[in-house]
Image (spheres, helix red, strand yellow):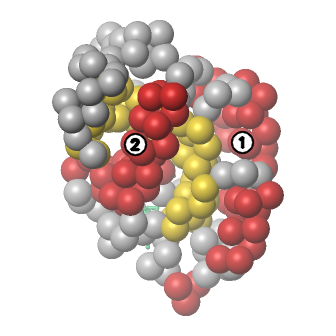
């Protein structure tokens, strides 16, 4: 398991170093994001594409979890994402609460070519809503580059997201399509939420 050492938590210590009222000055935020979903859906690939702008065919299954960080600027705000990439294999399921505890957002990942991974979103959704009530939840459908093997239809995913009041983002960590948009959306949602509270 990778680890980033000690860290200050955004909710406990709002890291907005500039004056809230001065929108022209630079604000800084730390957000903890947890990636959850069935093994093989591409959680590791998404985080690696975002943090290192690269992709590996045939990555190994994650053991426990990995930790990565990346800082980006959105609308004059500096946002540091602290990414917990969890292991999807069933044997690690019991560890998940350790990683989603205090998360600002959960990205629930499924694979458009694997209907079972889409079905399994339900249990993650319930678990996060129950245990981390303030957490922003984003549904992330990965592998849209494999259009000819698609088994989950866009409309089904969109309907499911609407029913559950979540945002759906379709990405490909292989081509990089929409990866930047996923994190820009997360940064916007979270900094807006933080600003209001
Ligand atoms: P666990 O660590 O076991 O939970 O799996 P994971 O969700 O981290 O999946 P991982 O990122 O290891 O990807 C699983 C496989 O899918 C690997 O062979 C990746 O190369 C492949 N993969 C991931 N993302 C994509 C994608 O967008 N398109 C395609 N075609 N393959 C992908
Ligand atoms: Mg992994």
Residue drawn where x is 69% and y is 68% of the image: 157
* Disc 1 secondary structure class: helix
Q: Viewer-proximal residue, 173 or 57?
A: 173
Residue 108's place in the image compared with 31, above or below, is below
Q: Quadrant location of the N terminus?
A: top left
Q: Viewer-proximal residue, 53 or 42?
A: 53
Going from N to C along the chain, the mark reached first, 2 or 1, is 1
Dot 1: few (<14), some (14–19), or many (≥20) neighbours within 10 Å? some
The residue indicated by pointer 1 is: 124
Q: CA distance from mark 2 to mark 1?
A: 22 Å
Residue drawn where x is 40% and y is 42% of the image: 187
Q: From the viewer's perspective, tell me whether residue 168 is left or right of residue 144.
A: right
Of the two numbered discs 2 and 1 in the rendering, the one whose residue sits closer to the viewer: 2
Q: From the viewer's perspective, tell me whether residue 117 is left or right of residue 49.
A: right
Residue 6's place in the image compared with 159, above or below, is above
For this orientation, the residue located farthest to the front is 21
Residue drawn where x is 61% and y is 81% of the image: 150
Residue 114 visible in the displayed image: yes
For this orientation, the residue located farthest to the bottom is 148
Residue 9's place in the image compared with 156, above or below, is above
Residue 38 image position (x, y, % from top left): 63, 51
Residue drawn where x is 74% and y is 34% of the image: 129
Residue 141 image position (x, y, % from top left): 56, 64
How many numbered marks does the figure carry?
A: 2
Residue 62 visible in the displayed image: no
Residue 112 image position (x, y, % from top left): 60, 71
The residue indicated by pointer 2 is: 187
Q: Which mark is residue 55?
A: none
């Amino acid at each position: 398991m990778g680890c980033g050492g000690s860290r200050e938590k955004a909710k406990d210590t709002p890291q907005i170093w500039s004056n809230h009222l001065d929108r022209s000055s630079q604000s800084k935020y730390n957000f903890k994001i947890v990636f959850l979903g069935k093994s093989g859906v591409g959680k590791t690939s998404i985080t690696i594409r975002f943090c290192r702008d690269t992709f590996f065919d045939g990555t190994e299954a994650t053991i426990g979890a990995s930790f990565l960080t990346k800082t980006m600027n959105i609308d004059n705000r500096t946002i540091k994402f602290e990414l917990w990439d969890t292991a999807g294999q069933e044997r690690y399921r019991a560890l998940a609460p350790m990683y989603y505890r205090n998360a600002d957002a959960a990205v629930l990942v499924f694979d458009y070519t694997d209907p079972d991974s889409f079905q399994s979103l339900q249990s993650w959704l319930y678990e996060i809503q129950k245990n981390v009530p303030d957490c922003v939840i984003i549904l992330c459908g990965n592998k849209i580059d494999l259009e000819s093997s698609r088994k989950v239809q866009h409309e089904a995913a969109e309907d499911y997201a609407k029913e559950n009041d979540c945002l759906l983002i379709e990405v490909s960590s292989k081509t990089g399509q929409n990866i930047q948009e996923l994190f820009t959306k997360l940064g916007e949602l979270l900094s807006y939420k933080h600003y209001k509270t």
